[in-house]
């Protein structure tokens, strides 16, 4: 069965530090990849997604992610975080031949201190 | 647009009770989903629907039932609640396929004692 692994469950960093969250998946075929974010007290929302083409994807709020097919990875990055980036981040994967079944990672809680 | 709305926000059930979690979307989306989120486990798909009258099981369907009589509504029914169903439940919708952006509701926190 396919799975999605997020390397860190909790990350604490200071404002202006760089952020990188790891995501690996186990599926041999073609996949679509997503990062969702849940800010405190808000709905889960899409941060960015990759379907095809340029493996470096830019999303909202200065986030980007890089798809490395050979490593089955889709890591999320932000060069300089702000306190408002405090949130829980979820990586999600859906094989292109899978109907309706988006697979989520366990999530990474990120806390940015002023 | 209200987006995806869920009721109730919180609920405490006794073992063996039943209840229905309501979900409504006003975006005319065809696809709708129910997930549960347990601490440290991410979101698990319970059931999904690709349109009115069509539903299918996700990863963790046992103990739940769904129906989709209209495009807007996708209620989740818990029969004979068990402590293992203590979780946060999220409803989501997407326009035409599962790879479209999914829009999530605020969640329902359910405790079964």
Image (cartoon, grey):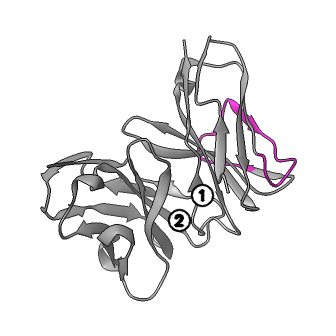
A57 relative position to A12: left or right: right
In percent of width and height, residue A80 lies at 17, 67
Pointer 2 or 1: first along the chain:
2
Residue at the spot of label 1 = A101
- The span picked out in magenta is B56-73
Q: Would residue A7 be seen by someone viewing this image from the given angle?
A: no
Please tell me how many numbered marks the rendered image carries. Answer: 2
Q: Secondary structure at mark 1?
A: loop
Residue at the spot of label 2 = A94
Judging from the image, mark 1 belongs to the subunit labelled A
Judging from the image, mark 2 belongs to the subunit labelled A
In percent of width and height, residue A26 lies at 40, 63
Distance from Cα at disc 2 to Cα at disc 1: 6 Å
| B10 falls in the magenta region | no
Residue plotted at (76% across, 62% down): B28
Residue plotted at (29% across, 67% down): A75
Would you call the spot at circle 1 few (<14 residues within 10 Å), some (14-19), or many (20 or more)?
many
**Depicted B64 relative to depicted B56: above or below:** above
Question: Badges 2 and 1: C-beta atoms under 8 Å apart?
Answer: yes
């Amino acid at each position: 069965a396919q799975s999605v692994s997020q390397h860190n469950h909790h990350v604490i960093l200071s404002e202006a530090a760089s952020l990188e969250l790891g995501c690996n998946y186990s599926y041999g075929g073609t996949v679509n990849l997503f990062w969702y974010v849940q800010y405190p007290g808000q709905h889960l929302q899409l941060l960015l997604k990759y379907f095809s083409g340029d493996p470096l994807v830019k999303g909202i709020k200065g986030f980007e992610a890089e798809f490395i097919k050979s490593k089955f990875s889709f890591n999320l990055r932000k060069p300089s975080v702000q306190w408002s980036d405090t949130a829980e981040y979820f990586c999600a994967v859906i094989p292109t031949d899978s109907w309706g079944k988006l697979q989520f990672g366990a999530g990474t809680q990120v806390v940015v201190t002023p | 647009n209200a987006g995806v709305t869920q009721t109730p926000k919180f609920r405490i059930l006794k073992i063996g009770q039943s209840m229905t979690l309501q979900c409504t979307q006003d975006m005319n989306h065809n696809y709708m989903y129910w997930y549960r989120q347990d601490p440290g486990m991410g979101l698990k798909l319970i059931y999904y629907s690709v349109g009115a009258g069509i539903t299918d099981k996700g990863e963790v369907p046992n103990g739940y039932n769904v129906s989709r009589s209209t495009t807007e509504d996708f209620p989740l029914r818990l029969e004979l609640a068990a402590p293992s169903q203590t979780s946060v439940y999220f409803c989501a919708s997407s326009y035409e396929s599962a790879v479209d952006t999914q829009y999530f509701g605020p969640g329902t926190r359910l405790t079964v004692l």
